[in-house]
Image: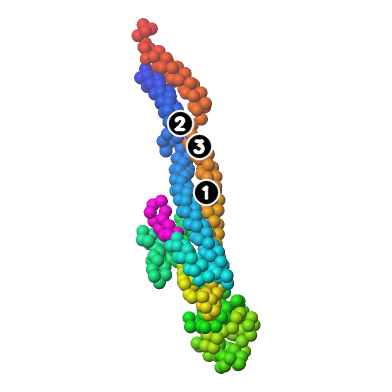
Amino acid sequence: MRMSTVQIFNQGMNNLLDRQADVTKTQEQLAAGKRIMDAGEDPAGTTRILNITSDLARIDSYQRNTDNLQTQLAMEEGALGAVLRDLQRVRELTVQANNATMSAADRRSAGAEISSILDSLVDRANTKDATGEFIFGGFQADAQPFARTTAGVTYNGDDGERFLQVASGMQIQSRDSGNAVFMAAVAGNGSFDYRGATGNTGNAVVTATSAADNYAPETYTLAFIQASATDPVTYTVTGDVSGQVAAGNFSEGGAITFAGGEIRLEGTPANGDSFTITSSPRQDIFTSVKDLMDAFAGAAETTANNAKVHNEASRGLINLDNAIEHILSVQSDVGSRMRRAEMQTETNDAFNLQLKETLSTLQDLDYAEAISRLNIQMLALQAAQQTFAKTQNMSLFNYL
């Protein structure tokens, strides 16, 4: 096959350009450290790289969320721990003030300290995070959620609960509403609560309450009657719906049973004394503390007043223990969420590492192989240049 001079020239030029392109491509790869410089070189590999890069960005977002989540939960756990310490101190003061040897002045002193602790509890409930948001305000995090008034403590937030995305299909609650944390403790024994009438003159003190599964909840009045000093003390239990459900002679320490409920009293009730028994409502922890503060406010040391104080203190201790148990339950749930966040962080880290290794395999250049290839390509380019230089000067006139 005969080739013209033009054909030989073009073939040599094309070979030279190809070798130059090979060298340029390898040099660009070495400069960038990347195996794939253009999507057209490896469409399938490029698609995988784009997908992995998107996954890495998403995991990075999840990790920022888990970091934020752990910070918020740690702040809430710290605030709840401080609340528990305050409630435990109120309990200590209540047990001390409920001692029969305590004077009215001693009780007033305990009440004053409890009032100070109530202010502290409100401050805890108004805890702010680093951005200035109130952590117990629900969705209304920019406004102070709790305020103390003469009547008690009011909640001005909402029931909003915030969540953060920490993985595909997984959200973890980052904040609890103040209503759920501070305003929803159980009152009484879980079935009913009681309170002595303010006009009671006897020294009867409630020592125990209980309710069976068949307890019929409604408002009951336990009333005591003694027609004369020589007559026995009798009682009636009357429901506001069902009417009288129990009656009998009062026996100190004996059980008074009614509609599936039971109540025991020590001491002797006076004629006309009464106790109101209500279904256990959800009671805020501030009311539980304020009731104890009011109970120790300064009643004179009389038998009747001492009985009132003991009744309120005994009742208050039950509600205070309920409040402590409720806060412990919330704190436990916060701790559980913190552990879930930590575990998810570890899972995300492991997945992140796996994706980066895969991305490196697809995208990163093997420098040793690329340098070896560049040396071979440089030799090929030099050979092509030398060959082209020789063929460029070839002509039939050289043989005439």
Give, as a three-letter code, the residue at label 1: Thr
- Prevailing SS of the magenta stretch: loop
Disc 3 and disc 1 in contact, CB within 8 angstroms: no
Check residue 133 for magenta coloring. Answer: yes
Q: Which residues are magenta?
A: 122-136
Is 88 situated above or below 272?
A: above
Is 225 situated above or below 123?
A: below
Q: Residue at x 50, y 55 (%)?
A: 78
Task: Look at the image and name its color scheme.
Answer: rainbow
The tally of labels here is: 3
**Residue position marked by numbered label 1 in the rendering:** 345
Mark 3 and mark 1 lie on one chain; the one further toward the N terminus is: 1
Which element type, helix, strand or loop, lies under badge 3?
helix
Q: CA distance from mark 1 to mark 2?
A: 30 Å
**Residue position marked by numbered label 2 in the rendering:** 33
Q: Position of residue 4 (x, y in %)?
A: 38, 18
Mark 3 and mark 2 lie on one chain; the one further toward the N terminus is: 2
Label 3 or label 1, whichever lies nearer to me, is: 1
Q: Residue at x 47, y 72 (%)?
A: 298
Which element type, helix, strand or loop, lies under badge 1?
helix
The outermost residue toward the top is: 400
Give, as a three-letter code, the residue at label 2: Gly
Give, as a three-letter code, the residue at label 3: Ser
Q: Nearer the viewer, residue 269 or 208?
A: 269
**Residue position marked by numbered label 3 in the rendering:** 360
Q: Nearer the viewer, residue 219 or 359?
A: 219
Q: Position of residue 189 (x, y in %)?
A: 57, 74
At label 1, counting other C-alpha atoms closer than 10 Å, the crowd grade (few under 14, some 14-19, many 20 or more) is many
Mark 1 and mark 2 lie on one chain; the one further toward the N terminus is: 2
Q: Residue at x 54, y 50 (%)?
A: 342
Which element type, helix, strand or loop, lies under badge 2?
loop
